[in-house]
Amino acid sequence: MKYAWWLLVLGGVAHAGSIKAPAGWIPNESAAVSLSQRLGAVTHFGDKSAIVTTEVYRSTTGNGALYVTRLVANVPATQRQRAASFEISELSAPIRRAGDKAKRLEESRALVVEDKKLVDGNEAWTDTSTDVTTRARMVIVADAQQMVAVVGECVMGAAASADELAACKTALSSIDPGIAFEARVPLSLAATDLTDAQQLQKPPAGSASGPSLVESGERPSLPPMQLPQDSREPDRRPIFVGLGLIVLALVFYWNRKNREKLERQYEKTTADKPVAAPDQPAKSDRDADDLHAAAEDDTKESKS
């Protein structure tokens, strides 16, 4: 199915109450929004345009992740069986694309639960090339106008603990499509849509398990994508610091050149002017009077 390949790099904010996430797991809203936009650009339920919303959660260790995708489309009553069969078959699409790299962990199943008026499907498999295990559950319900499918996927790395896996599986059991039971209409699956040799069987009312793998016929699908590792944004701070130093150096260089230019202009301006002679100290008339008075006193003394 297309969801598992896209969910590690994409995601969005889903219908409130679609699932009860494990306690302490961290939501990733930016990834969820991106996934909603991407999945909204392709058809669902066979050939229908759908409103797509998603939730993305990561465990605190980063070894496990939970992805929830909710699809809503207008489906006429005459097309419900075909639409539900097409969508439930998408649970097994990743396994078909993985080919020999896929190893099923348990028998696939798609059940029509009559007393709850829903279709319930489960799939569990490991990609042997990456050691990534996926456990997925899809619940489909419909009312008189719309069909809603909610798929939850636990994607666990090789280092994921048993507690992380158990918490994620518990979350899958809490999926709520968001249509009240009173408003639901009965659903069925079309055995003619199956590509495997198995035949579709309805479990007893209230049964939580049953046989049968539902597979659809040919359907356009997205190409497989390898599960990418989280990428980190490059640290651009050293670049900014280096650019700042270059700018400061250019400012200092410009100031120095400007100062030298001003100094040369000043020297050129003052070089043509004659240098004024220093002022001679002026003789005070009072000093001259004092000298005359002192000379007269000396003359008088000598005469006496």
Image (cartoon, rainbow, N blue to C red):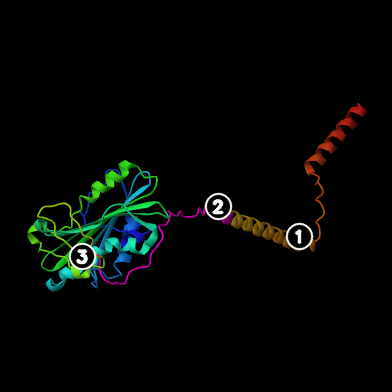
Residue 168 locus on image (x, y percent): 28, 47
**Dot 3: element:** strand
Packing grade of label 2 (10 A; few <14, some 14-19, many >=20) is: few
Does any portion of residue 138 appear in the rendered image? no
Q: CA distance from mark 1 to mark 2?
A: 44 Å
Q: Is residue 262 visible?
A: yes
The amino acid sitting under disc 3 is Val
Q: Which of the 4 image quadrants contains residue 270?
A: bottom right
Residue at image position (51%, 54%) is 236
Identify which residue, 62 or 37, lies in the foreground. Answer: 62
Side of 163 where 243 appears, left or right: right
What's the CA distance linking mark 3 and mark 2?
A: 47 Å
Secondary element type, mark 2:
helix
Q: Which residue is mark 1?
A: 267
The residue wearing badge 3 is: 72
Residue topped by disc 2: 238
Residue 240: x percent and y percent?
54, 55
Residue depth check, mark 3 versus mark 1: number of the one nearer the observer: 3
**Snapshot quadrant of residue 88:** bottom left
Q: Is residue 217 magenta?
A: yes
User: With respect to residue 142, does 206 lie above or below?
Assistant: above
Residue 260 among magenta residues: no
- Picture residue at 57% right of the left edge, 57% below the top: 243
